[in-house]
Image: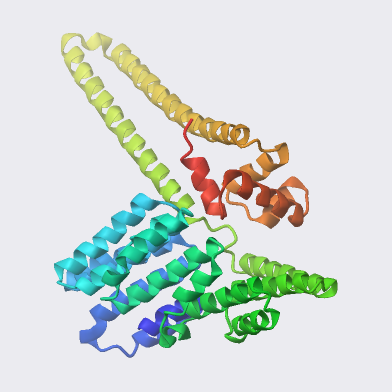
Amino acid sequence: MDSLIGVGEDEPRKIFKILDSLQQKILKKDLPLYTIELHFIKGCAYRYLSKYDSVMHHFNKVIDLAEKYGYKHYTTNVYRTLGDEYIDVGLHDKAIENYNKAIAIHKEFGDEIGAITCSYDGLIEFSEGKYEESNRIIKKKLPEFKKSLDAYVYFLGIVALNYRDLNQYDSAKVYIDKIPNNYLLDSYYNYHKNSLYTNYYLKKDDIDSARYYNKLIKAFNYDENHIITYYENELNIAKRNNNVQLQLQYADSIEKIRSTQLKKLKTDQISNTESLLQYEERIKEEKKRIFQHKIFFMITILVLLLIIYALFKRSKRNRIKQEHIIAKMQQQLQETVQELTKIKTKSTENSQEEIALKIEELSKKHDLTERETDVLVQITKGLNNQQIADKLFVSVSTVKFHTHNLYSKLDVKRRTEISSKLMYSKK
């Protein structure tokens, strides 16, 4: 089953057919455990399709079934995976909450090594771009991580990536070289090693070596994003050689792959899927609305009970006035409902105005141009570059130019950080 998780990452849609065909061959006594693992793998597959409603549905199934059949230790995979995902989008409190759940369960079963694999020491600093602080924390913990080779290798890779982002490729190479060869068969480590080596030799002006390791990226048959990295490296090599023709060729290749990716997204009907950050915000708003509806319902019931009670008391005293009393109480109920509806509408309007004010504040604070502000508004709506270009009637390259300026001015490295920065910015 472990090997199927990798298939789910690379070809998430293919995994569903494989799992359905396997279910016919499972013995009845093995069915509970198989079902738990099936839901976990499906959750991972949906994660790579950015369908977080389905991810949470299958992960919650894992938790429920694991409790029911006595496989609680399997839930650590769910909590650790969610921790990794929340780290990626900057929801650090949620990430720590899930990592700690995984660690607690490992310790409950006396699994010290498992608890170490769920460590998040230095990861938050890494995701925030605090590379020196991340390395300081991780390097101090490396002796402890050695108890689990998987954790040790993983954090060696994080240290190497920190040094890469600090533009210290000599140090990055030292740590990537510590990773055992058998781990380099994994696409994650192999890709980062070859990518680091390419940039290392490019910094040394050893173009032949840089080209050699860059070709290994392509030869290992990575996904389209890694092929883009290959072409970007070749583009940098061409720039070093002042080869304009190759520069145009590789730039064109990058654009074609990205265009193909966009068409594929539209074909698979997942171009409008929400990010995890947007999913969490939507769930938060839904919970808020449900709470408001409950309050609304309780108040309505209370008013109705008061009306019934009042009608009962008054009908005893004066049956002649009964119709007048009913009409009056109904009017009071209608007015109460209208007032509650106004409160709900006003709450929604205030939320929209708050978002607009945050965008305006952020624009002034970071001296954004009018067009950069327009692009920022569209990014917060979850639109991709092509959709923003269509919306603003400009080219994709123009959108990329303004997006690059936004990254620089807002001091962020990815889109999700822009949404996070806007969401949690203080007035």
- 210, above or below 427, in the image: below
Q: Residue at (53%, 47%) from the top-left corner?
A: 419
Q: Residue at x 67, y 45 (%)?
A: 375
Residue closer to the observer: 344 or 326: 344
Residue 11 visible from this viewpoint: no
Residue 263 place in picture, x, y as percent: 68, 68
The residue positioned farthest toward the right in the image shown: 245
Query: Is residue 256 visible to us here?
Result: yes
Q: Quadrant of residue 272?
A: bottom right
**Residue 325 or residue 402, whichever sits in front:** 402
Q: Position of residue 149 (x, y in %)?
A: 32, 79
* Nearer to the camera, 255 or 302: 255
Marker count (numbered): 0
Colour mapping: rainbow
Tell me what residue is drawn at x 84 percent, y 71 percent.
244
The answer to whether 220 is drawn above or below residue 251 in the figure is below
